[in-house]
Amino acid sequence: MTTYGDLPARRILAALLGLLVLVPVTACGTSQDGDRDHGTTGGTATATTAAAAKDHPAARSVAAYLDDVWPEGAPGTVVAARGDALVTCAGRGLADRAAGTRARCGTVYDIASMTKQFTAAAIVKLQSEGRLRTSDRIGRYFDHVPADKRGITLHHLLTHTAGLPEAVGDDYDPLSRDELAAAALAAPLRSRPGDTYAYSNTGYSLLAAVVEKASGTGYEAYLAGRLFRPAGMTRTGYVLPDWDPRRIAVEYDRRGRPQGTPLDHPWAADGPYWNLRGNGGMLSTARDLLRWHRALLSHRVLDERATSLLFRRYVREGAGAQSYYGYGWSLLDLGGARVATHDGGNGWSAGRVTRFLDDGTLVFWVSSAAARAGRWDLAAMDRELTTGVAERVRARP
């Protein structure tokens, strides 16, 4: 099994450069999980039904675009918003072929490396609570740190500049928190701390461990209590949500063979093993990603200063790159607009979340069958999907 991180040519941040995102079919209003979407203006919730979204000036344009470009038979869900106003949220194809279950706005997917935004937000939240500082060295949280790693700070982990390896094993290796930390600290560095950007899932698993040590509670429990609940997110997590298995998308490989849902894979009783925890494997819905977007806009979870830390351009994503890494987000300019984005995938599922920081446009798409040999490859279509939706959402009526 591959580790969670950006899908190869998927680091389409370079490919994304050039244009200025997203969609419908089984619509949003009251969802299959029984929730309604709520817009927020100054913290006041207003119901947004499917009919209201359909009336958005961009809704039909986005729907027509997706009808043209979304591959026939590919399961997935797309949500798009402008500020806190929903443009569209809908599923396409079957989330479970055997059961004939359609993908919907409330279908649950593995969002893979998009999990990192929540880990980063938890660290920033803990800093605002006075429980840690991003400048802290890891020796404050881990024992027996070897000399070559004593200079590593939480900032280095957040920005993939610690020099740690991408992974220290398979996603499903039964590693505990302490075993993960020991393996990470024993691994040879790829570069000196602070010198070079090198994407590291291991670093974000260490950050999840720091969340536990600084908060005195479990990683998922902290996210649920301090991030998800205040944002109104009811279907995001590992094991704490009361999952209805019928609402979780079945994943399919390139040959169309079912691989079960994420909950069918080897996990510990409290969530994924630690090669995956904190860097990937989070389950969520398009509806909850919309709620998270609205919470970031309104600063209901993080105040303005804390939010700004997530979207600061700390380090280029490679020599000569036109994109940068913030805290849990890749950052770049598209046609003069500031964009925060992240992709994720595990070889079966794939998706991307994109936020335009100037006008609050959101585009999120996800599929539980990212590729079908000879028919489609959604990761390869990333630029086309994301920018195509975004252009239509951002277009003036």
Image (cartoon, helix red, strand yellow):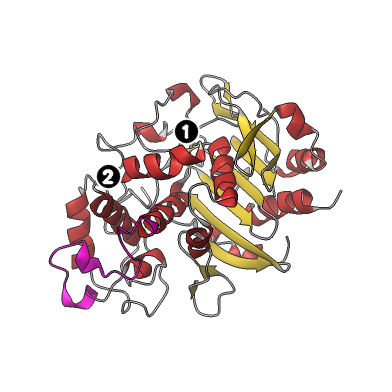
In this picture, residue 122 sits left or right of residue 369: left
Q: Amino acid at mark 2?
A: Tyr
Q: On screen, 183 above or below 2?
A: below
Residue lying furthest right: 397
The residue shown at (59%, 29%) is: 103
* Residue 220 image offset from top left, x and y in percent: 34, 42
The answer to whether residue 220 is visible is: yes
Disc 1 on helix, strand or loop? loop
The residue wearing badge 2 is 273
Q: Is residue 137 magenta?
A: yes
Question: Which residue range is magenta in the image?
Answer: 128-150
Which residue type carries mark 1? Arg
What is the x, y in percent for residue 378? 60, 47
Q: Which image quarter: residue 217? A: top left
Dot 1 alpha-carbon crowd within 10 angstroms: few under 14, some 14 to 19, many 20 or more: many
Cα gap from disc 1 to disc 2, whole angstroms: 20 Å
Determine the residue positioned at 40% across, 77% down. Answer: 196
Closer to the camera, 15 or 163? 163
- The residue under the point 36% across, 77% down is 194
* Residue 211 against residue 292 in the figure, above or below: below
Residue 364 at x, y = what percent? 60, 46
Q: Secondary structure at mark 2?
A: loop
User: Pointer 1: what residue?
Assistant: 235
**Local crowd size for mark 2, using a 10 Å CA cut-off: few (<14), some (14–19), many (≥20):** many
Confirm whether the magenta stretch covers residue 144.
Answer: yes
